[in-house]
Image (cartoon, grey):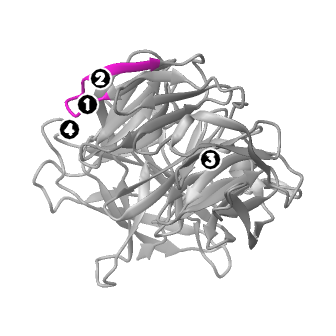
Amino acid sequence: MKIPFIGQSYVYRNLNFDAQRCINWYPIKSETGTSKNIDGLQATPGKEEFCDLGNGGIRGSWQTLGRAFSVSGNKLYEIYSDGTFELRGQLRSNIGYVDMDDNGQQLVLVDGVYGYILNLSTNVFSRITSPAWTGSATVCYIDGYFIFVRPDSGVFYISDILDGLSLDALEFASAEGSPDNLVACAALQGKLWLFGTQTVQIYYDSADPQFPFDPIDGAFIQYGCAAAHSVANSANTVFWLGSGTEGDGIVWMATGYQPQRVSTFAVEYAISTYGDVSDAIGYTYEEEGHFFYALCFPSANTTWFYDINLQQWHERAYWNTQTGRYERDRAVTHIFAFGKHLVGDWKTGKIFEQSLDLLDDDGDVIRRLRSSPHTFDSDNLNYIYYHRFQLDMMTGIGNLTDPNPQMSLAWSNDGGHTWSNEHTRSAGRVGNYKARAIWRALGRSRDRVFRVITTARARLTLIAAHVEATKGNS
């Protein structure tokens, strides 16, 4: 019989309630309803070096007008389609996220304390030295204006029209709907979103000559933002890690001017264990019709991904073979440039190409893990004797790099607290599409969680799991 196996990450506070993990897999779903199974798990993309900027971890990336830029350490580089790069400017800071936006003529960078401009026509790099500059962690561009957020205040301020270097000390306003401090700004469909610690307010360009931005009546959200750089746009909406007067740790998506909770209780529980989440970083990307919102937690060394289409969460992680532990995904920035998904490595100065056709993490194995929902006798929790477990998957996917890819099965009989040894089976040598991954004589349990692990360098898809089992007596 087919057992529940495919699904998202959902590890609850109480493992005996739910202990599902989905690491380096993401759920897929049939759109026809006539596929072999309604759901499946697709292996997440691999990475290979596109270039190595070599000056320290990637702090921010941007693409515009066919050009690509990344900050490595304290230097801004322009990256070319052949993987070569050129220094464009030097920042005064060398740690912390760098936010960027452009108006087609100027690329603006902010690092919280300092602001910089790269003239896209002359490639002259300058620091914003206007006396009206007071710092900003984020920047956005709307209708000719760059918008900045003054640190530790409820004030936002703007540049002169089409000139980020020129600021007027009188061109500012307070987001007065709530007394909380602003932490971030974002542009969405021509509107200015101002994220405070407890609220979000939306403004529009009123063309008022005194100050061009005014609040939209009724566009006021009673949930704020816990991390300035968690704010990210995708699919005509905006995502952010929330905070408010009642607590924090909920991930929100805007539906019109209303907040929609997209995190699950399990994700929120995980976030609650991370401590300070103000350094969280969000980005979005699309691949083969799946729109993803990535949420990286540097201090917690963890990365979550939300599939906007399927409304499901999974985890992505780098497997450290030296420590035998998962670390957060190496990608912390994303741009789509030169027809490639280019992601920045938070640890080194590398820019990776990320693709479903790549089968490892720039030469390191990707350790993929799926632990299932609980399997048990729903009538009276009698023993179940497991004679056989078969993993329905794409087989025969061996290749020259990994001619005989392996899958390992382990199980827990105590709700996911402890696990058996791993038992390995072949996923089929190259071309052996009729191969079957089967495990036999698996003992008994009143409550079992199955776990499948693989480091195979192969194009993997999981479809379902089937067991042959017999109910026993209590």
Q: Which residue is mark 2?
A: 85
Which callout, 3 or 1, points to the residue nearer the camera? 1
Specify whether residue 84 is painted magenta.
Answer: yes
Q: Which residue is mark 3?
A: 230
In the image, what residue occupies the spot 79% across and 58% down?
A: 199
Q: Position of residue 38 (x, y in %)?
A: 38, 77
Kind of element beneath mark 3: helix
* Amino acid type at mark 3: Ser
Distance Cα–Cα, label 3 vs label 2: 28 Å
Distance Cα–Cα, label 4 vs label 1: 32 Å
* Amino acid type at mark 2: Phe
Q: Position of residue 267 (x, y in %)?
A: 66, 56
For the residue carrying disc 2, how many other residues have a C-alpha within 10 Å: few (<14), some (14-19), or many (20+)? some
In this rendering, position of residue 114 left or right of residue 306: right
- The segment highlighted magenta reads 79-89
In this rendering, position of residue 415 left or right of residue 103: right
* Amino acid type at mark 4: Asp
Q: Which residue is mark 4?
A: 402
Q: Could you tell which of marks 3 and 1 lies nearer the N-terminus?
A: 1
Specify whether residue 400 is painted magenta.
Answer: no
